[in-house]
Image (cartoon, grey):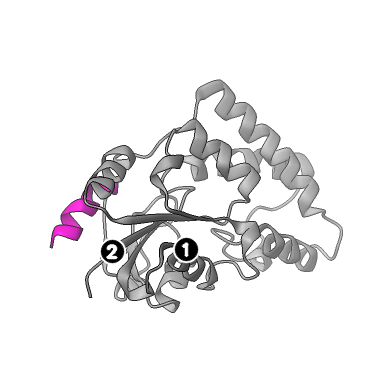
Amino acid sequence: MEIKGIIFDMDGLMFDTERIALMVWNQVWESEGIDPNCPKLGDMHGITVQEAAMRYEKAFHGKVNYYELRKKKQALMEEYIHTYGLPVKKGLYELLEYLKERKYRIAIATSTMEKEAVPYLEMAQVTAYFDGRVFGDMVERGKPDAEIFCKAAEQLGLKPEECMVLEDSWNGLRGALAGGFHAVMIPDQQKPDPQLSKKLTAICDSLLDVPHLLEK
């Protein structure tokens, strides 16, 4: 079926913010004496704030308040971006222009909460490109559940099989596949998983490769 819509993840896909987030999280964890590699936390990429809070509650038996830690992390991250600017991923503007010119429907599906994501979109001056926007606080089940992508497709007026999802995380890709979307990985902090890779439509080096993929 013809691809009519493109659904973007945000952190690590549009903006190089996963790298910054990891850096400032390490600062917070170190200050609190927390092991960042605690196996009970599992893969935190792409999950909602609520899911992360539940994992912390279970892993640390209520002794660690995730929301307080996250406030410290957000403050450090905002300070960094205010100082150095928002790093935009290579090819983002070129891809958005390409898609708009060819009348593709475009949506964003990010686990980041709306109040935190919107300033990034405005800072990068890309808000007007998106026909649909779904944020982490607009869904009950975060990635790897397909809910966030299904809501984005619904906003675009398209079926999952008519949409391509661009993701950098395993959880996001699993969610896209679970919903019946065409899933494309553009690696950032996580590298391609051999088993998951077999199920993907493609793995691209950057956003600049997506137009070539669509033209195939």
Q: Magenta part mainly helix, strand or loop? A: helix
Task: Say if 187 sits above or below 121 in the image.
Answer: below
Screen quadrant of the N terminus: bottom left
Residue at point 86%, 58% (across, down): 63
Asked whether, in this view, residue 30 is left or right of residue 163, the answer is: right
Indicate the position of residue 127 as horizontal and vertical percent values: 46, 41
Judging depth in this view, the residue of 5 and 178 nearest the camera is: 5
Judging depth in this view, the residue of 69 and 132 nearest the camera is: 132
Indicate the position of residue 136 as horizontal and vertical percent values: 61, 58
Q: Which mark is residue 179?
A: none
Label 2 SS: loop
Residue 134 seen from this side: yes
Q: Is residue 215 magenta?
A: yes
Mark 1, other Cα within 10 Å: few <14 / some 14–19 / many ≥20: some
Residues in magenta, as a range: 207-216
Instruction: Please name the amino acid that badge 1 sits on.
Output: Gln
Q: Is residue 162 magenta?
A: no
Task: Say if 160 sits above or below 209 in the image.
Answer: below
Q: Which mark is residue 155?
A: 1
Tell me the residue that label 2 is attached to.
4
* Cα–Cα gap, marks 1 and 2: 13 Å
Instruction: Please name the amino acid that badge 2 sits on.
Output: Lys
Residue at point 42%, 53% (across, down): 131
Among the two numbered marks 1 and 2 on one chain, the one whose residue lies closer to the N terminus: 2
Marks 1 and 2 in Cβ contact (< 8 Å) = no
Asked whether, in this view, residue 216 is left or right of residue 10, the answer is: left
Asked whether, in this view, residue 46 is left or right of residue 182, the answer is: right
Label 1 SS: helix
Asked whether, in this view, residue 213 is left or right of residue 120, the answer is: left
Mark 2, other Cα within 10 Å: few <14 / some 14–19 / many ≥20: some
Residue at point 26%, 66% (across, down): 3
